[in-house]
Image: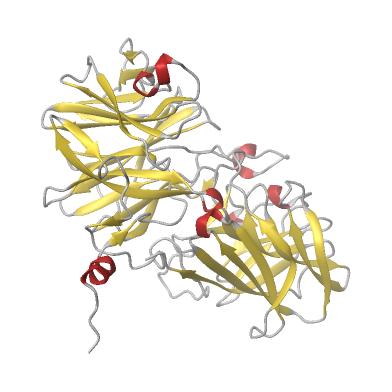
C-alpha cells in the first residue's frame, strides 16, 4: 500500500497563485451575500468592461460586459487609419449600494467618465450616465446617500457626484491627499510611478484607500492610507512589496477571512490576478505571510479557465443562443453587417467590407485571451470565396503580432506566416495551397515568462507541420494587453470576399 504524503494532499486541495493565469488586470471586486463579482479592463475590445462572478474567489466565470460600444468614432471603429490600442475603457470600480450594482470606468479615447447601473448584474438592463471630465483610475464610493469619486496620480482628488450620477456636484472637488506616493518614496525622493489605482473601502468605521506606486529602481508597491473620516486626514503605509504584485483592494468572505486582490505583470500573457491573505493588526490590513505573497491559498482549487474565461466554439447555435458566447471580444468596434453565425449553420462567416493596408487596422478580428502556463488555439477555415488580395487565418494579437494566414492571389492560394517580433511584420514562410479547407494552430508557452509561440498547419486536421519562425512575444505598452488569439479576414485589393471558420478550439496546461 502506497502512502500519500499529507502535504501532497493539502497541496492538491488548495488553490494556487496566480488564481487566474490570464490577462485580467485592474480588478475591482465586491461580495453580495455569498457571491463575489469582479470587473476588469479590456480597453480597445468590444464589448468591454468584463464582469465575472465566483462562489469561492478562485473559479470565475464571465457573466457580461458593462458596455457594447463607448462611442461611434473613427478611433474606436478602426476607420481612416485611426485606432485606440491601449486606450478605450480603463480601470473600473464595481460597487453594490441599496440594491443596485454600479460599475464605473473612464476612457481616454472619449475623455469621459461612465457609470453603468443595474438591479440585475447578470441579466440587466443597464442604465448609463456619462460625463466629463475623465477621472483617471477612480474609485466610486457611497457614504449614506451620497456618491463620491476619488481619482488621480500622486495628488489624489475627491468629488461628490450629482444625485442622478449625471456629473460632478459643483464646487465639491478638492485635494484629498497631496502626495499619496510619499510612503513609498525612498529617502523622500520622487520619480517612478506616482500613486494611482485608487480603491476605497470602509471597514469597522475606518476608511482604507489602496493605491499602487512604483518607486524608481524598486518594484510595484501597495500603499494603504487610513483615516477616521472620509475627508481625512489620512496616514499612509507601504503594505506590500513582493514580486511586483500590486494594485487592487480588499474582499472579505462570509467566514470572516480577508484577502487582497492584486495583479502581477507577467510578460506576454498579460497582467494576472493574485489573492493575498490579510490579517488585521492595530487597525491596519497586513498583507501576505511575513510580507510575502504565498503560492498556496486555503481556498478551493481552480478547475481551470475553460469554460469560465475562455472556451472552444464550434459555432453551432440553437434557437435562443447568443450569437457569440461571452468569451469572444472584437478588436475595436465591429462592423456587424460583415459577420454572421447564421448564414451558414455551424460556421462563423467573416466578410470583407473595405480595403485595408495592415492587419492591425483591419476590422472584425474576433479574439479570446491566451492563458498560461501554456495553451493552444486551433481553427479550421474554408477559403474558396476569398478574393484577390485577401488575408484570413489565425493570429496572436499584440503590437508585435504573429499570424498564419491564407493569402489569395487571383485564383491561387498560399499559406504564409508573418512574424512581427521586431515590431515590423515580416513574411518568413510561404507555401502553396491546393485545397479549399485548411487547419491552423498556434501554441503559446508563457512558462517562467518564456513567451514563445509557434505556428502549425495541417491539410487533414490530423498531421501537423511547423511553419515559419518562433514568435518572441512581448507585452508592449502601445497595446497594453496580453496576447490574444484572433480570427481575421481582411481585403487588400477587392472587398466582398468571405471565409468560413468551422471551429476555434482552445486547450491549456493547468497551473494547478
Relative to residue 298, is residue 342 drawn left or right?
right
Along the viewing direction, whichever of 243 and 270 lies nearer the viewer: 243
Residue in view at x 30 percent, y 23 percent: 161
Q: Is residue 496 visible?
A: no
Relative to residue 346, is residue 500 drawn left or right?
right
Relative to residue 248, is residue 24 drawn left or right?
right
x and y, in percent, of residue 191 in the image:
50, 20
x and y, in percent, of residue 225 in the image:
27, 24
Position of the N terminus by quadrant: bottom left
Residue in view at x 30 percent, y 55 percent: 53
Q: Is residue 181 visible?
A: yes
Q: Is residue 71 above or below residue 147?
A: below
x and y, in percent, of residue 156 in the image:
37, 19
Along the viewing direction, whichever of 106 and 443 lies nearer the viewer: 443
Residue in view at x 73 percent, y 73 percent: 383
Along the viewing direction, whichever of 266 and 201 lies nearer the viewer: 266
Amino acid at each position: 500500500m502506497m502512502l500519500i504524503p499529507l502535504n501532497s494532499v493539502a497541496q492538491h486541495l488548495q488553490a494556487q497563485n496566480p488564481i487566474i493565469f490570464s490577462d485580467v488586470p485592474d480588478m475591482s471586486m465586491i461580495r453580495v451575500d455569498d457571491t463575489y463579482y469582479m470587473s476588469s479592463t479590456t480597453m480597445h475590445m468590444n464589448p468591454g468592461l468584463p464582469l465575472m462572478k465566483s462562489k469561492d474567489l478562485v473559479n470565475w466565470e464571465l457573466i457580461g460586459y458593462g458596455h457594447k460600444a463607448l462611442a461611434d468614432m473613427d478611433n474606436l471603429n478602426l476607420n481612416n487609419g485611426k485606432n485606440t490600442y491601449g486606450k478605450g475603457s480603463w480601470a473600473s470600480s464595481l460597487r453594490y449600494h441599496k440594491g443596485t450594482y454600479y460599475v464605473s470606468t473612464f476612457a481616454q479615447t472619449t475623455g469621459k467618465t461612465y457609470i453603468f447601473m443595474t438591479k440585475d448584474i447578470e441579466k440587466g438592463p443597464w442604465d448609463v450616465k456619462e460625463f466629463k471630465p475623465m477621472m483617471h483610475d477612480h474609485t466610486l464610493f457611497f457614504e449614506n446617500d451620497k456618491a463620491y469619486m476619488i481619482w488621480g496620480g500622486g495628488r489624489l482628488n475627491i468629488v461628490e457626484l450629482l444625485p442622478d450620477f449625471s456629473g460632478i456636484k459643483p464646487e465639491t472637488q478638492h485635494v484629498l491627499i497631496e502626495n499619496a506616493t510619499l510612503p513609498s518614496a525612498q529617502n523622500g525622493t520622487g520619480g517612478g510611478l506616482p500613486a494611482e489605482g485608487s480603491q476605497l473601502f470602509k471597514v469597522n468605521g475606518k476608511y482604507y484607500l489602496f493605491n499602487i506606486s512604483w518607486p524608481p529602481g524598486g518594484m510595484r508597491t501597495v500603499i494603504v492610507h487610513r483615516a477616521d473620516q472620509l475627508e481625512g486626514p489620512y496616514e499612509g503605509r507601504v503594505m506590500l512589496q513582493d514580486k511586483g504584485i500590486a494594485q487592487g483592494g480588499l474582499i472579505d468572505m462570509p467566514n470572516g477571512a480577508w484577502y487582497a486582490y492584486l495583479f502581477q505583470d507577467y510578460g506576454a500573457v498579460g497582467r494576472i490576478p493574485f489573492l493575498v491573505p490579510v490579517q488585521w493588526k492595530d487597525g491596519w490590513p497586513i498583507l501576505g505571510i511575513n510580507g510575502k505573497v504565498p503560492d498556496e491559498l486555503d481556498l478551493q482549487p481552480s478547475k481551470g479557465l475553460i469554460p469560465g474565461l475562455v472556451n472552444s466554439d464550434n459555432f453551432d447555435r440553437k434557437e435562443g443562443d447568443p450569437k457569440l458566447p461571452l468569451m469572444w471580444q472584437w478588436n475595436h468596434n465591429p462592423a456587424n453587417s460583415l459577420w454572421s453565425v447564421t448564414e451558414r449553420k455551424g460556421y462563423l462567416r467573416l466578410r470583407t467590407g473595405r480595403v485595408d493596408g495592415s492587419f492591425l487596422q483591419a476590422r472584425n478580428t474576433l479574439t479570446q485571451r491566451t492563458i498560461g502556463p501554456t495553451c493552444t488555439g486551433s481553427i479550421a477555415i474554408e477559403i474558396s470565396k476569398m478574393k484577390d488580395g485577401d488575408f484570413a487565418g489565425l493570429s496572436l494579437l499584440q503590437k508585435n503580432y504573429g499570424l498564419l494566414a491564407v493569402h489569395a492571389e487571383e485564383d491561387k492560394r498560399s499559406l504564409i506566416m508573418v512574424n512581427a517580433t521586431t515590431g515590423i511584420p515580416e513574411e518568413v514562410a510561404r507555401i502553396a495551397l491546393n485545397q479549399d479547407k485548411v487547419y491552423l494552430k498556434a501554441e503559446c508557452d508563457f512558462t517562467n515568462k518564456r513567451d514563445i509561440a509557434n505556428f502549425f498547419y495541417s491539410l487533414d486536421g490530423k498531421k501537423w507541420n511547423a511553419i515559419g519562425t518562433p514568435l518572441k512575444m512581448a507585452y508592449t505598452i502601445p497595446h497594453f494587453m496580453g496576447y490574444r488569439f484572433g480570427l481575421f479576414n481582411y481585403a487588400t485589393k477587392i472587398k466582398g470576399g468571405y471565409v468560413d471558420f468551422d471551429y476555434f478550439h482552445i486547450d491549456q496546461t493547468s497551473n494547478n
